[in-house]
Image (tube, rainbow, N blue to C red):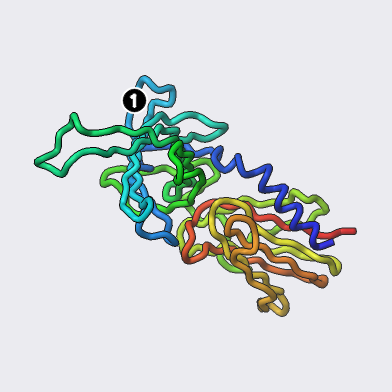
Amino acid sequence: MIQLFRIITTVFVILAGTAWAQSGITIQGGHSGGFYNAAQSGHGVFAEVLDDSSVPTGKRMVVAWYAYFQGRQIWILAVGNVVQEGTGQVAVMDAFIYEGNAFPPAYNPALTDEIPWGEIRMYFIGCDNAVLQWDSDISGYGSGSISMQRLTTISGTSCDPGPGEPSADDHGDTWQTATAFPVKAEYNDAIEGRHENRDDVDVFVFTLTGGQPVAIFTLGSTNTVGTLYRINNNQETEIAEDDDSGISNNFLIEANLTAGTYSIHVKPAFTGIYGGYTLYLLTDTD
């Protein structure tokens, strides 16, 4: 029966995958800056949000992606509108590469070849994390997506947390201050969480009245680590820990547990981005 939970997690991803872009985040000037993926240091993007009253959202975005292609360094430049998509906003940009010129002072604007590259989309998870998606028309680049975290901030800009993203800690950091997770016989029991920084640990507690298998996991575009403890005599004893067994670097813990009280600690992985996630607790009540 416990393997059924793996099937359910896959279904959740299919249902929730498109919702990550609809995260309720309004793109602001404070989203401007440099972003990169810590596991792929050496390439990234510079993004700038621009005011434009002719656009329904009032904003456009310019992105410069410094990367590599076939062994040589390349810049991919993109510009487009910020559009409303569900409850959130995403920048949808036409991308180009440029060739055929010389280094200054020999540079001649008439010699520059502008080559359409494809489309780049960028949306944000909170103020400091982003997802970059691309679909290129040029052979070899393909399509895909990558999670990124903030590297630099433009002086004088700020970013307000989006809906469901409080600036204060949303869940306690110890089992004594943990958020209670009621155990129900419903597959969609879930709690929203957010790591406010790389050192934040969110703790949840739940109680089982009888022995049964459980599956505990997160969904979202952050990289989470989960640790399961049993609480007895006011002490925690570790049962299991997992980093990437779930979907897209999320943790997944499956265990056969006896009756008792347990805690689950959720923290961001050291090499991953931090931000919002959804925690699921599935139980086999048959």
Residue 133 position in % (x across, y down): 48, 43
Q: Nearer the viewer, residue 122 or 286?
A: 122
Local secondary structure at mark 1: loop
- Which residue shows up at 81% across the image and 63% down it? 2
The C terminus: image quadrant = bottom right
Furthest toward the top, the residue is 54
Can you identify the residue that label 1 sits on? 52
Q: Residues within 10 Å of mark 1 (few under 14, many from 20)?
A: some
At 54% from the left and 59% from the top, the residue drawn is 223
Residues 151 and 70: in front is: 70
Depth check: 252 or 43 in front? 43
Task: Say which quadrant the N terminus sits in.
Answer: bottom right
Query: In the image, what residue occupies the spot 42% across and 59% down?
Result: 40
Instruction: Indicate the quadrant where residue 236 lies.
Output: bottom right
Q: Position of residue 43 (x, y in %)?
A: 36, 54
- Which residue does the image show at 53% across and 31% down from the upper left? 85
In the rendered image, the vertical position of residue 50 relative to residue 259, given as above or below: above
| Relative side of 250 to 196, left or right | right
Callout count: 1
Q: x and y percent of residue 36 in the render?
A: 39, 53
Work out whether residue 82 or residue 234 is closer to the camera in this orientation and state it.
82
Q: Is residue 177 visible?
A: no
Going by the numbered disc 1, the residue's amino acid type is Asp
Residue 205, percent across and down? 69, 64
User: Which residue is the extreme one toward the right?
Assistant: 286
Whether residue 260 is visible here, answered yes or no, is yes
